Image (cartoon, rainbow, N blue to C red):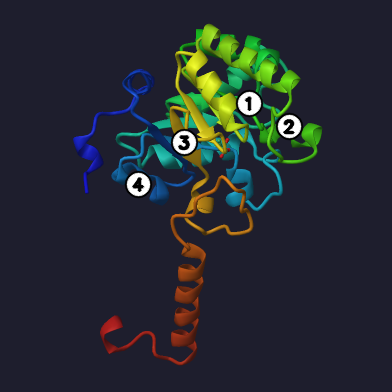
Amino acid sequence: MHSSKDLPKITTHVLQEMKQKGEKIAMLTGYDYSMARLLDKAGIDVILVGDSASNVMAGHRTTLPITIDQMIYHASSVMRAVERALVVVDLPFGSYQGNSIEALNTAIRIMKESGANAVKLEGGEEIVESITRILSAGIPVLGHLGLTPQSINKFGTYVVRATDEEESSKLMNDAKILEEVGCFGIVLEKIPAKLAADVTKSIGIPTIGIGAGKEVDGQVLVIHDMLGINTDFSPRFLRRYNNLQEQMISSFLRYIDDVKSQDFPNEKEQY
Ligand code: KIV
């Protein structure tokens, strides 16, 4: 197995080169120091400090409640662990939709207080003024189109997006706008594979898919889902690489048993 120390530090320019070379980008979410250390050690290209922390770390039903302070807490914990990966942080719901100055102030706070490398915002044409202002401050921006979980109350469900002509042509148009204004990449969430492939071919910046098929420039998953820590969420696009829930609960059960039966600690485990 390689060590991440042998691999080049990831920047937005490296991601661009990866697209040109046809080398796929591997991205996972990360929210804390210990997990981020393991991700970086394994050589992950991008760590997304996603607002999915609202679900998997805090137990909320949606991504809406998480605050800027909480995102900064997660992002700065991740930054203390990372040597190689590019770290991207979600701007939380309500922190950028108001106006572009508010969006810029949020992005600056996140960059200054966490030390992260870039931010991600959900939406296309409707938030382009905010994206442009953030970019003009020298902050790299990753776009996010398709299923945008911060708009769950508008959509009403988490079903696959852009299946009709109107929505798919808006998505294609949004992707071109995001490239034109200077985003370094776009997350495409839960859209038809054919549309994701068409978008990927039509723009020069990398696309990172989640439930968007294989003909994109990279993939992202939520770490708790792919490790099988959280098993309540089983969309078709999710591949589970482990069943940590089972392994963790079995460890907790053994520990509880050992404590109750006074097997733990033994002679060697005391002073
Ligand atoms: O918050 C998040 O984890 C995300 C990914 C699902 C792309 O935005």
Q: Which is nearer the N-term, disc 2 or disc 3?
A: 2
From the image, which quarter does the C terminus lie in?
bottom left
- Would the CB of label 1 be found within 8 Å of ligand 1? yes
Q: CA distance from mark 4 to mark 2?
A: 32 Å
Find disc 4 in the rendering and name its residue.
Answer: 37
Find disc 1 in the rendering and name its residue.
Answer: 122
Given the image, on which type of amino acid does mark 1 rest? Glu
Q: Which is nearer the N-term, disc 3 or disc 4?
A: 4
Find disc 3 in the rendering and name its residue.
Answer: 219
35 vs 262, nearest the viewer: 35
60 vs 101, nearest the viewer: 60
- Would the CB of label 3 be found within 8 Å of ligand 1? no
Q: CA distance from mark 2 to mark 1?
A: 9 Å
* Residues tagged 2 and 1 counted as in contact (Cβ below 8 A): yes
Question: Mark 4 or 1, which is nearer the eye?
Answer: 1
Q: CA distance from mark 3 to mark 4?
A: 20 Å
Q: CA distance from mark 2 to mark 3?
A: 22 Å
Label 2 Cα crowd, 10 Å radius (few <14 / some 14-19 / many 20+): some
Given the image, on which type of amino acid does mark 2 rest? Ser
- The residue tagged with tag 3: helix, strand or loop? strand
Find disc 2 in the rendering and name its residue.
Answer: 151
Q: CA distance from mark 1 to mark 3?
A: 17 Å
Q: Is residue 142 visible?
A: no
